[in-house]
């Protein structure tokens, strides 16, 4: 099967800033992601996770190797990126925020409003469609970010610690929401997180990166059944075992 994303022998270097030497952010990375797969990327701070996501999005050139994205529906955007913290426009209402991506794609007004409202319902914000971000909690703002990303309907969603700034309880709820949205949309997701719990809750596979220069050190195939529910999962014995295997690989790198 042709992978949706094929990262082959990729090295990415940054030219040093004034006086500083060159930085090798990632080195010799090989990673294949299948269509519809949910892959989580974990690794210590500074190991090149954001750099790699940006390269898949085409926002960052690679120094060596290749990244190939195989399209299946040219009418959809190839990729969209969701960043840490809620990247919503403060001067737009919830509806306008969710509608934004559809507008940039040139979808007619009636169609895109209906589509935006559908995703606003999915993230349970229908009562807040006319509210502005400052009238919402951080968790609600991040729901707006999710609705906007899914409404845009990319083939691949690249998510960079989207829940990193949220409290633990809100995070659990948003993980369940994300799983629901992903299951409805069937898109491919590459998701960066610092949390092994989050990676195991969400992913089909957890890919482990080494400290900088980031290399792929190993991976864990997550055998937990779907549909999953973030809290229930944790009492499954496979969960604890998988957590232990990932942590034993990461521990030295994080030190
Ligand atoms: N524009 C840049 N110019 C020079 N060096 C950079 C630039 N962006 C990132 N780096 C360096 O590249 C390395 C990887 O950065 P990156 O942001 O990809 O790491 P990360 O794994 O996402 O870290 P974190 O988990 O803290 O978000 C770091 O050492 C960083 O300092
Ligand atoms: Mg990062």
Image (cartoon, grey):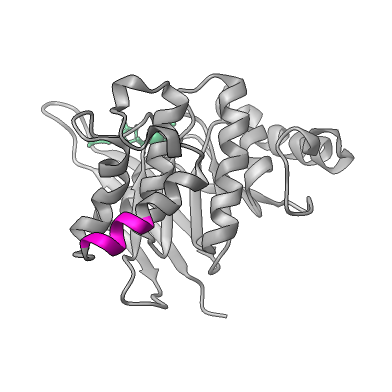
Q: Quadrant of the N terminus?
A: bottom right
Q: Which residue is at a point 18% across and 30% down the rendered structure image?
A: 91
* Residue 227, percent from left and from top: 73, 52
State the count of labels.
0
Q: Quadrant of residue 38?
A: bottom right
In the displayed orientation, state which residue is furthest to the right. Answer: 237
Q: Which residue is at a point 31% across and 29% down the rendered structure image?
A: 131
* Residue 83, percent from left and from top: 36, 38
Looking at the image, residue 120 lies above or below residue 189: above
Ligand 1 is found in the corner quadrant, namely: top left
Looking at the image, residue 227 lies above or below residue 241: below
Q: Quadrant of residue 232?
A: top right
* Residue 242, percent from left and from top: 77, 41
Q: Which residue is at a point 42% across and 60% down the rendered structure image?
A: 156
Q: Main secondary structure of the magenta part?
A: helix
Looking at the image, residue 79 lies above or below residue 218: below
| The stretch drawn in magenta includes residue 111 | yes
In magenta, the rendered stretch is 109-115
| The stretch drawn in magenta includes residue 108 | no
Residue 63 vs residue 76, the one in the foreground: 76
Q: Is residue 77 in sight in this rendering? A: yes
Q: Is residue 241 left or right of residue 95?
A: right
Q: Is residue 47 in sight in this rendering? A: no
Q: Quadrant of the C terminus?
A: top right
Q: Which residue is at a point 55% across and 68% down the rendered structure image?
A: 34
* Residue 201, percent from left and from top: 68, 41
In the displayed orientation, state which residue is furthest to the left. Answer: 18
Residue 200 vs residue 134, the one in the foreground: 134
């Amino acid at each position: 099967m042709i992978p949706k994303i094929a990262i082959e022998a990729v090295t990415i270097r940054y030219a040093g800033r004034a006086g500083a030497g060159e930085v090798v952010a990632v080195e010799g990375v090989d990673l294949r992601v299948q269509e519809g797969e949910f892959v989580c990327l974990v690794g210590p701070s500074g190991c090149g996770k954001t750099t790699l996501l940006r390269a898949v999005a085409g926002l960052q050139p690679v120094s060596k190797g290749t990244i190939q994205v195989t399209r299946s529906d040219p009418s959809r955007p190839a990729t969209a990126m969701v960043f840490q913290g809620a990247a919503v426009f403060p001067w737009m209402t919830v509806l306008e925020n969710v509608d934004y991506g559809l507008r940039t794609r040139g979808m007619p007004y009636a169609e895109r409003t209906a589509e935006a409202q559908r995703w606003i319902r999915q993230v349970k914000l229908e009562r807040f469609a006319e509210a502005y971000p400052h009238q919402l909690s951080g968790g609600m703002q991040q729901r707006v970010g999710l609705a906007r990303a899914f409404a845009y309907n990319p083939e691949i969603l690249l998510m960079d610690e989207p829940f990193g700034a949220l409290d633990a309880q809100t995070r659990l709820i948003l993980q369940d929401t994300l799983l629901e949205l992903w299951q409805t949309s069937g898109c491919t997701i590459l998701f960066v997180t610092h949390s092994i719990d989050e990676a195991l809750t969400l992913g089909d596979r957890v890919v482990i990166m080494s400290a900088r220069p980031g290399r792929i050190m190993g991976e864990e195939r997550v055998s937990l059944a779907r549909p999953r529910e973030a809290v229930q999962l944790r009492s499954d014995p496979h969960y604890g075992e998988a957590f232990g295997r990932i942590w034993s690989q990461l521990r030295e790198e994080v030190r």
